[in-house]
Amino acid sequence: MVRAVLFDLDETLLLDEPVTREALAAAAALAGPQVDPVRLAERAWAEARRLWAQGPHAAYCERIGHSAAEGLWARYDRGDHPAIAGLRTWAPGYRAAVWRAALAEQGIRDDGLAEAMAERFAAARRRYLCYPEVDPLLAALRERGYRLGIVTNGVPDLQRTKLEGAGLNAAFDAVVISGEIDCGKPEPGIFHHICRALAVEPGEAVMVGDNPARDVAGGRAAGLRTVWVQRLGLARDPRHPADLECTDLAAILPWLDRLA
């Protein structure tokens, strides 16, 4: 019997990459007609990944699932892990360096502009858009008596800000963030942590997410049923089959009704 439904946050409930790309474009537009803005944004995206991988906290960020794009706008003002404090100090330089490198690729050297672009990206990225089926789905699950939880990787301030900005907090009975418990998907511990918080056994819970390796494989290894939602055209990964595969979260309702 399923008693709880657990959701990933980014690209499952909230649009993530599309908003990031819009923020990159907004920042690139500051450079004016002297540059190719599309090329500039793509270069910044590539430089962010490159510099992030070389950063002093790359291993920690990989472990908790905190990405290069998120490092461009996180505040790092919540959490007591030493790496959070380190990121708070290191990230401003990283952000400016991303845009300096992107501008330099088009022959522009302007530190002030790079810093302004870093600030513009962070401001533009603070948009919290849910996929259209999310609100009616959560309401329907609540009406059916399911306990609801969020299982998300990332640093505390950013994931909490997303939940607050999207108005999702009130919909969930429990939230677990990898950066708050120092354990991230696909490790079984993060799934067991939220099951304890919801007072359900792993076999009574379903994990819903867009990432086959982290959400589906992780949930299955922890003893949960799983749902994979295809977002952004991501190809199915046959190594990580889910109990339900869908392109719209609304498909969860009839599936749960059949299980019941």
Image: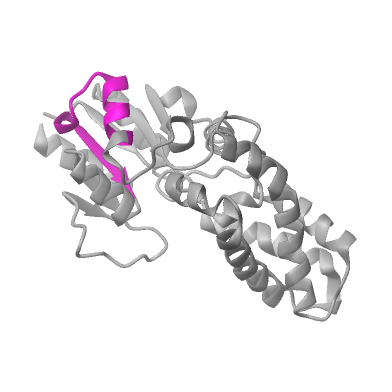
Q: Is residue 191 magenta?
A: yes
Residue 232's place in the image compared with 221, above or below, is: below
Looking at the picture, does residue 159 appear above or below residue 121? above
Q: Is residue 140 left or right of residue 128?
A: left
Examine the structure image and report whether residue 29 is included in the region drawn in magenta: no
Where is residue 55? Give x, y as percent: 61, 57
Task: Find residue 177 and report its image quarter.
Answer: top left
Question: Which quadrant would residue 128 be assigned to in this image?
Answer: top right
Count the labels in the image. Answer: 0
Q: Main secondary structure of the magenta part?
A: helix
Residue 88: where, in percent of width, then height?
Answer: 68, 41
The location of residue 73, given as percent across then percent down, is 66, 47
Whether residue 224 is visible, yes or no, is yes
Pick the front one: 258 or 65? 65
Residue at 35% from the left image edge and 38% from the top image edge: 7
Residue 39 drawn at (x, y percent): 68, 77
- In the rendered image, the vertical position of residue 101 relative to residue 192, given as above or below: below
Foreground: 65 or 32? Answer: 65
User: Is residue 248 in sight in this rendering?
Assistant: no
Residue furthest out toward the top = 199
Quick check: 218 left or right of 32? left
What residue lies at 65% left-to-right and 49% top-to-bottom?
Answer: 125
Tell me which segment is drawn in magenta: 190-209
Q: Which quarter of the rendered picture does the N terminus lie within?
A: top left
| Depth check, front residue: 226 or 84 | 84
Q: Quadrant of the C terminus?
A: top left
Q: Residue at x 48, y 31 (%)?
A: 180
